[in-house]
Image: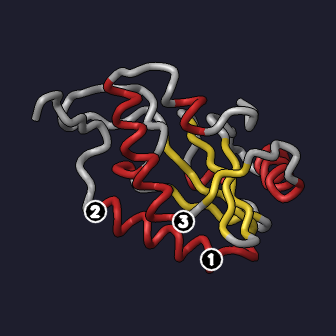
Amino acid sequence: MENNNSLSYREQYINHANIPETQARSRRLTSFESASELKEVFNNESYKHIQICEYVRTKTNARLDHTSFWELGNMAVVLSETYNSNLNDFQCNELYVVEIPVNIALYCGGWSNVLDAKPGTKSFLITTRLKKRQLDKVFQKLKEQSEKMPRWNFIREVGK
């Protein structure tokens, strides 16, 4: 799936319905933005982001899905949330990839309210190899925040 940056992440994947899945997504998005300090980019023609996507498409076995563009300072980051990809799919000298911890991962498709269920998607932050150190700092913040968060599919019950 290509990036549809005419809509924000919240508009595209959360605001379309008020259901448990989108309620949990909203909670995780808020925590993700706060912890990572990444800012969403709405320019779907951003050269840096397009270049990262092109590397994924042409130099890896990975597949982009539920893609959005983010940045921190001058670091471009592509967020891909796919049902069919793993870190080993990204063996590419030009790219650096981290998997977002599940309790703070944004999309988490394949909704289930079962206590020990696992989401069907994995969420990856992808940048250029030159930005490895900067993305590692973001990842560490996300990891620390995710350890303080409830499970990915936790929903606060109404009236409690």
Disc on res. 134: 1
Quadrant where the N terminus is found in the figure = top right
Q: Residues within 10 Å of mark 3 (few under 14, many from 20)?
A: some
Amino acid type of the residue that numbered disc 1 sits on in the rendered structure: Gln
Q: Is residue 118 visible?
A: yes
Left or right: residue 143 compared with residue 57:
left
Residue at screen point 53% across, 76% down: 137
Q: Which residue is mark 2?
A: 147
**Of 87 and 114, which appears nearest the observer?**
114
Answer whether labels 1 and 2 touch (C-beta < 8 Å). Answer: no
Q: Which residue is mark 3?
A: 37
Q: CA distance from mark 3 to mark 1?
A: 12 Å
**Of 64 and 141, which appears nearest the observer?**
141
Residue at screen point 24% across, 38% down: 154
Measured as percent of width and height from the top left, residue 152 is found at 31, 43
Q: With respect to residue 86, does 158 lie above or below?
A: above
Q: With respect to residue 93, does 45 lie above or below?
A: above
